[in-house]
Image: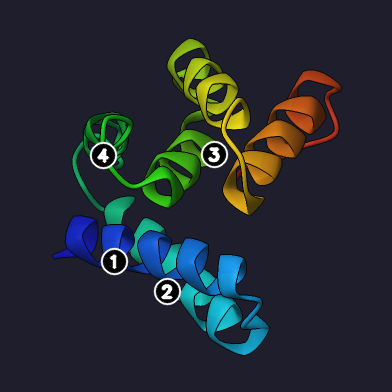
Amino acid sequence: MSVEKFTAAAQAHAMFTEQGDSTSANKAYNDVVSAREEMRNFPDHGIAALKDLLTDSDPGVRLWASYYLLPTATVCATNTLADLSSESGLVAFSAKMTLQEWNAGRLKVE
């Protein structure tokens, strides 16, 4: 259930962000964080599930999965963020900024 919740919340967050609906985007953000916390209870702390989501068709899902994988699967995560950043829109911009801040050592992912 947590993976499905994560996927739906990540999709919603991207959609509401693109629409400029900050209230709904903030709620979806909280849902992403909550789902990620649930996934930490998996035997591998949800790492395999997040890696599987790197190939999801939705860019918002790939963005959030990449973000949470930065500390543990850095190469996969940064490659996905680089791919996303070459697209257009706010998800692409978020991917670019996430990658930039990670590479500069200013981003702490918990």
| First in residue order: circle 3 vs circle 2 | 2
Q: Quadrant of residue 11?
A: bottom left
Amino acid at circle 2: Asp
Q: Which residue is drawn at 56% across and 27% down?
A: 81
- Where does label 2 land, which residue? 31
Residue 87: % across, % down = 57, 33
The numbered disc on residue 67 is 3
Which quarter of the rendering shows the N terminus?
Answer: bottom left
* CA separation in Å, label 2 and label 1: 9 Å
Q: Which residue is drawn at 51% across and 15% down?
A: 79
Amino acid at circle 4: Asp
* CA separation in Å, label 1 and label 3: 16 Å
Q: Residue at x 61, y 83 (%)?
A: 21
The correct choice, above or below, for 45 with respect to 26 in the image is above
Q: Which of marks 1 and 3 is in front?
A: 1
Q: Residue furthest top?
A: 75
- Where does label 4 land, which residue? 56
| First in residue order: circle 3 vs circle 4 | 4
Residue 25: % across, % down = 56, 76
Does residue 89 appear in the picture of this structure?
Answer: yes
Residue 89: % across, % down = 62, 48
The numbered disc on residue 8 is 1
Amino acid at circle 3: Tyr
Disc 2, disc 1: CB below 8 Å?
yes
Left or right: where 42 falls relative to 19:
left
